[in-house]
Amino acid sequence: MYKSFLSWRYLLRRPVNLIGIVGILVGVGALILILSIMSGFLEETRKTVRGSLADLIIEPAPRQRGTGRSLPEEPSKILELVRADPRVAGACAQLTWFGLLAPTGDSSPVVIFDPQNASRCGVQLYGIDSADEFQTTDLRAALMQESRRGTLRVLDPDAPFEPPPEYVPDGKPHDCVVVGEQLATAFDLKRGDVINIVTANPRPEDTEFKPSNKRFVLAGTFRTKDNETDLGRIYMDRQVLMELLGPPRQFSQVLVKLKDYPQQGKQVRDELSEKLYRAGLTAGYKSEVRTWEQFKEILLGAIANEKVLMAIMLSLVLLVAGFTVYAILSMMVTEKRRDIGILCALGATPSGIQALFLMIGFWDVLIGASLGALIGVVGAFQIDSIERSISKLFGIEIFNRDVYLFDYIPSVVDPVSVALIVLGAFVCTFVFAFWPAWKASRLHPLDALRYE
Amino acid sequence: MIQTSATETPVAAQQHGVLLAARGIRRSFQIGPRKLEVLHGVDLELRRGELLGLMGSSGAGKSTLLHILGLLDPPTQGEVVLDGESAWKLPVERRARLRNKKIGFVFQFYHLLPELNALENVLLPAMIAWSALEYRGRKEELRERAVNLLQSFGLSERLKHRPAQLSGGERQRVAIARALFLDPPILIADEPTGNLDSATGEKVLELLLAEQEKRSLSLLLVTHDERIAHRCRRVVHMTDGRIDGEPGAVVPQG
């Protein structure tokens, strides 16, 4: 009984213990808060990156290994094989290539290699079959997103490549494209504007580089919140891009959406890879059928890595808190030598004395870790409004919303991580409290009693 | 008062019921290269209900002997028999339990815990004796007993006072209440009035002797004050780590 009673009393009567408690509180709170934000970033990035992709990406290699067979130039067989799998929810073909965007009214000859000309911009051209695309990717949702500048989005997302009412045909009607919201902003494009797209599709037999040039009407914008996509992607009908590029390119990749990606993703990937190879539709390389996570593994890996590094760095705060507890308890053992002697004279055992001082560490970590966890969790849930309040109060912008893929600070509180951090704080404190507590238990009662 | 040798013949000891006995106790300390012998084979017996005074000049070894008898300091040689058991051969946990249940200590410098009030200080041996669950089950009863004890010692107004708020005499009375709280059969008092003025010391001594009488305690009282020694029924003298006199020698006083 005396252990819990006295340890609590010592804790209350010695304000120096507050330093240890605050140290643990800060360590636990910061760890939970920062890791929740990092998890939020990772989660949001995954969502954003996944948005313009699908669960599986099939990219047949240009040449087939050794067999001499040529790969299909059009995607229908691959789509047929993929859609035959009951676990597949949707599949679509995409044709992608590179181009240059030269905005409205620019009828001057295009100078491709002119780095000084800011009115030219490298873009990714995406040829899609919109109905299939909508079943497979999140493009339809991106088309519904209003631009930050106002009414720029397509009028009918289900028919994205229809000419907008703002467009007045001047002679031959042009095909329509949809551009990323940031690209439209950068070039101050409006719905109905005519833009010039320059591209080149050199074939092995070509001896010179022949660019092709075509005018398109801007039907509207899309917004995925992924800067790279919103700043550099132009969607058009696959048939239109095929005509622009010329034969033989009909598709670059097939995207596949699964009914249950988390559970079945890897299994379906491996099985499809095998089936496609057997059907002579791929060359048999593993890289030809990838999950979206493999496709973006460098980006996702980098953020996950940052999270781990952050956790390691912040664990040092806990380590410092542990040292503080060690220092405070060592001081208390010296200060309480006489008490230890008295307790021994009254019948306390060495193990009881050790437990008494360990229990002071226990109260430290119980209070510190509980409050820290509370502050960390509440802080993680409220981080966006906290940041806005602080920014408003000091008139500075702590989180620049234009830089990231999202316009709020994301955070995901993982209960397992919170439990592990709290457990870590307990282990750390007990490790550091053990030595002073052990020293207290080894004190000779008489040495302690003579300590007047 | 009778002045006597430290031990009696085994037959006599049996008759009087020896509760605590030192047998051939030697204690030496290593101070640098020098070995300092403090006790040279001391034999001493404390019988049930006996009030035994232990006198000697400073450095005679009486405190060392007291600590060995109180199971706080191990002898270099010899044994301490407490209620028939060789106490220093017991495991440390059992020895601590013996100390808790059977021996009450009163120190010259009171040795109260400064963080606790008078009542809590008195309750401390009970807190050590019982687990949290057992203690909570008997909390009210224990508290009532402690309050009654302190009231009977004239401290009813001082229950919630911490040691720093008490006078020397009051502190020593709290210390005596703490030592007696678990009704131990043995009370060891090391110069209990040594740190008090004579009037207060006298009152504390009266209280101690009254409790000894009332509870039939075996009280081992260490003092260098002849007046206090005169109040003891039996007194042994120590000089240079030895008990004076021969076994069986009885010197009548007064």
Image (cartoon, rainbow, N blue to C red):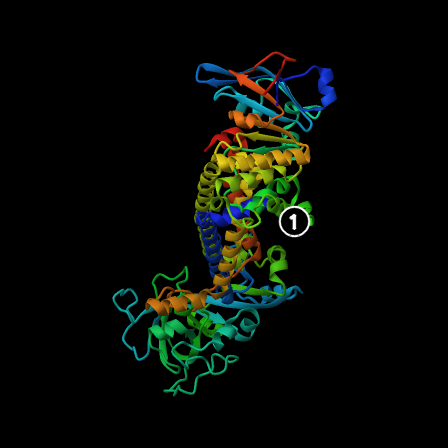
Q: Which residue is mark 1?
A: B144
Q: Quadrant of the C terminus of chain A?
A: top left
The x, y position of residue B219, in whole percent, is 62, 29
**Which x, y percent locates residue A46?**
50, 61
Instruction: Return the residue found at the far front.
Output: B254
Q: Nearer the viewer, residue A313 or A121?
A: A313
Q: Give the answer, above or below, for where A332 lies relative to A263.
A: above
The residue nearer to you, when weighing A87 against A357, is A357
**x, y (%) of residue B207?**
59, 37
Q: Residue at x 63, y 36 (%)?
A: B211
Whether residue A232 can be seen here: no
Please, is residue A376 above or below residue A441 in the view?
below
Tally of numbered discs: 1
Quadrant of the drawing holding the N terminus of chain A: top right
Q: Position of residue A125 (x, y in %)?
A: 43, 69
Dot 1 crowding, Cα within 10 Å, few <14, some 14–19, many 20+ = few
The residue under the point 51% across, 26% down is B225
Q: Residue at x 57, y 25 (%)?
A: B230
Question: Can residue B148 be seen from the camera position used here?
Answer: yes
